Image (cartoon, rainbow, N blue to C red):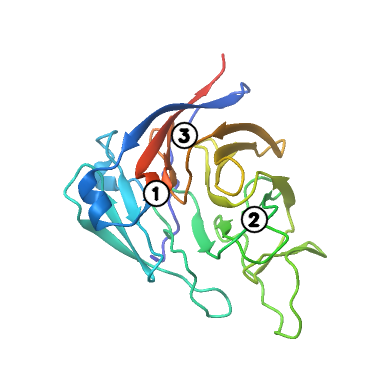
Amino acid sequence: MSGDRCPAGRTEQAQSSTPARIRNDRVLAIPVEARREHNLAGVEELSPRLRQEPEQFAIVAGALEGKDVRVVGWRDAVTALELVRDSAAPSGSNLSVASSFCRSNYPSDFVVAGFLHAVDANVMATLDAGRMFGSRVGVALMIVLVVLVGGLVAPLAQRGPASPEWPGVKGKGVTLLPNGWRIAPAGRSIAVGDFPMSMVLSADGRHAIVSNNGWSKPSLTMVDLAQQSVKARVPVDHAWLGLTWHPGGDRLYSSGAAENTVNEFRWSRER
């Protein structure tokens, strides 16, 4: 990752007190060529090369068999645009899911830890709604997404392997995540549904959108960060890791997992 901090590349929107809404607009099919060549994990990044063409965006190939992911253009010839290396947990072990680090259309650095199963999953946000996001469950096998903004929050040192600890708030303002990282401040837990896969912030920073795909109906959950409460749930047929905004901030794309589709959502405010 470059030594430069991620630029605030998102489009600034006028502040408004009216509630936000997301509406499922349409489903876009992935080309057959892409299905044959790639195990698609979904939308992860809007390539700068494609930003002037709203109907085109990039897709991240699945990284289930290795440590690499490929970002490929949609509606283009399927070619690799860049290579992203998988990361490792503080223990040094490789993670099973790779994600982007410091992309220009994100205001944050992303750290993703991938595991296998999830039960009773939640999303955590700090009181100032700007420093940390994470997820925790009652068991240690799940996907963890931590967003580090401007280096204000960092993983703290792990304890030795004396006895396993359950994830959760440990007191003194510290939370233990399922991947073994300790973060501070502890934050507050907001239930969003089982198996949260991915999470993105709205352009104005007021909402977090979380994709869920557990035992219940897959959905996108909209969290109001100021009130720290769930404002809306939108059911979808399938959800996965792919979740990203159009640079204009008015459209949200969510991958359809094995269905090889991408859901397009309109983001608007009630008048």
Few, some or many C-alpha atoms within 10 Å of disc 1 (few <14, some 14-19, many ≥20)?
Answer: some
> From the viewer's perspective, is 226 left or right of 12?
right
For the N terminus, the image quarter is bottom left
Few, some or many C-alpha atoms within 10 Å of disc 2 (few <14, some 14-19, many ≥20)?
Answer: many
The answer for how far apart the CA atoms under marks 1 and 3 are is 34 Å
**Towards the viewer: 31 or 91:** 31
The amino acid sitting under disc 1 is Ala
Q: Is tag 3's residue or tag 2's residue first in the polypeptide sequence?
A: 3
Which label sits on residue 170?
A: none
Which label sits on residue 258?
A: 1
Q: Position of residue 242 (x, y in %)?
A: 43, 48
The amino acid sitting under disc 3 is Glu
**Which residue is drawn at the image coordinates 46% and 64% (left, top)?**
97
Q: Is tag 2's residue or tag 1's residue first in the polypeptide sequence?
A: 2
Q: Position of residue 88 (x, y in %)?
A: 50, 74
Label 2 belongs to which residue? 135
Q: Position of residue 208 (x, y in %)?
A: 58, 41
Q: Is residue 88 above or below residue 153?
A: below
Which mark lies nearer to you, 1 or 3?
A: 1
**Which residue is drawn at the image coordinates 71% and 62% (left, top)?**
184
